[in-house]
Image: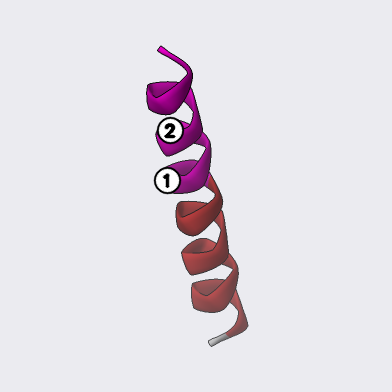
Amino acid sequence: EETRLKAEEETRLKAKEEAKAVEER
């Protein structure tokens, strides 16, 4: 359960970083 929450958080962070990179272009 805790591992899944961590994975979801990492995915959300990755998506946020990717969105930021796209906006900067």
Q: Quadrant of the C terminus?
A: top left
Seen at 47% across and 67% down, the residue is 8
Q: Estimate how packed mark 2 is, as few (under 14), some (14 to 19) or many (20 or more) residues with alpha carbons within 10 Å.
A: few
Q: Is residue 19 above or below residue 13?
A: above
> Magenta span: helix, strand or loop, mainly?
helix
Residue 3 in the image: state x and y as whole percent: 57, 73
Is residue 7 in the magenta section?
no
Per the model, the C-alpha gap separating discs 1 and 2 is 5 Å
Report the label total: 2
Give the magenta range. Answer: 14-25
Which amino acid is tagged 1? Ala
In this picture, residue 13 sits left or right of residue 11 = right
Which amino acid is tagged 2? Glu
Seen at 41% across and 37% down, the residue is 19
**Residue 7 bears which disc, if any?**
none
Q: Is residue 1 above or below residue 8?
A: below
Q: Estimate how packed mark 1 is, as few (under 14), some (14 to 19) or many (20 or more) residues with alpha carbons within 10 Å.
A: few
Seen at 42% across and 45% down, the residue is 15
Which element carries disc 2, helix, strand or loop?
helix
Seen at 38% across and 24% down, the residue is 22
Q: Is residue 21 above or below residue 15?
A: above
**Which residue is label 2 attached to?**
18
In this orientation, which residue lies closer to the viewer: 17 or 10?
17
In this orientation, which residue lies closer to the viewer: 20 or 2?
20
Residue 16 in the image: state x and y as whole percent: 49, 46
Which element carries disc 1, helix, strand or loop?
helix
**Which residue is label 1 attached to?**
15
Contact flag, marks 1 and 2 (Cβ < 8 Å): yes
Q: How is the image coloured?
A: secondary structure
In this orientation, which residue lies closer to the viewer: 9 or 21?
21
In this orientation, which residue lies closer to the viewer: 13 or 24?
24
